[in-house]
Image (tube, grey):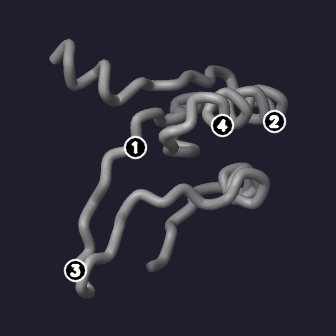
Amino acid sequence: MELKKSGASSAFLGLLFGCPRDCSYIYGIEIKVMSRYTVFASKGNETRKLYSTNDYQGAMAVEHTAKQLGYDEVYICDNLMEIMVG
């Protein structure tokens, strides 16, 4: 499985916190699994997904580190809540 990272800071965050696992393999078939929390960051007009996890404390740690790296806005999206409210 090849993970696609965009930008040096995203790769840096991946090294710090490990690469998130967003798919599983059962009998050689790739099955996508939704992570509960996703950390998004924007710099200028570009918004990118930095990290996906089921651990809220891990998402908060990535959010804090991304703010220190100089992103303009960083926020955590609760994917389950987004689906519930439509």
Q: Position of residue 65 (x, y in %)?
A: 78, 34
Q: Earlier in the sequence, mark 2 or mark 1?
A: 1
Q: Dot 4 corresponds to which residue?
A: 58
Q: Quadrant of residue 26?
A: bottom left
Labels 2 & 3 near each other (Cβ < 8 A): no
Distance Cα–Cα, label 1 vs label 3: 19 Å
Judged left or right of residue 55, residue 80 is left
Q: Going 67% across and 27% down the picture, which residue do you hit?
A: 60
Q: Amino acid at mark 2?
A: Leu
Q: Secondary structure at mark 3?
A: strand
Picture coordinates of residue 78, whole percent (x, y): 41, 24
Residue position marked by numbered label 3 in the rendering: 29
**Residue position for label 1:** 35
For disc 1, the neighbor class at 10 Å (few under 14, some 14 to 19, many from 20) is some
Q: Earlier in the sequence, mark 4 or mark 1?
A: 1
**Badge 1 element:** loop
Amino acid on which disc 1 is placed? Ser
State which tag comes first along the sequence, 1 or 3. Answer: 3
Cα distance, mark 2 to mark 1? Answer: 24 Å
Label of residue 69 in the image = 2
**Tag 4 secondary structure:** helix
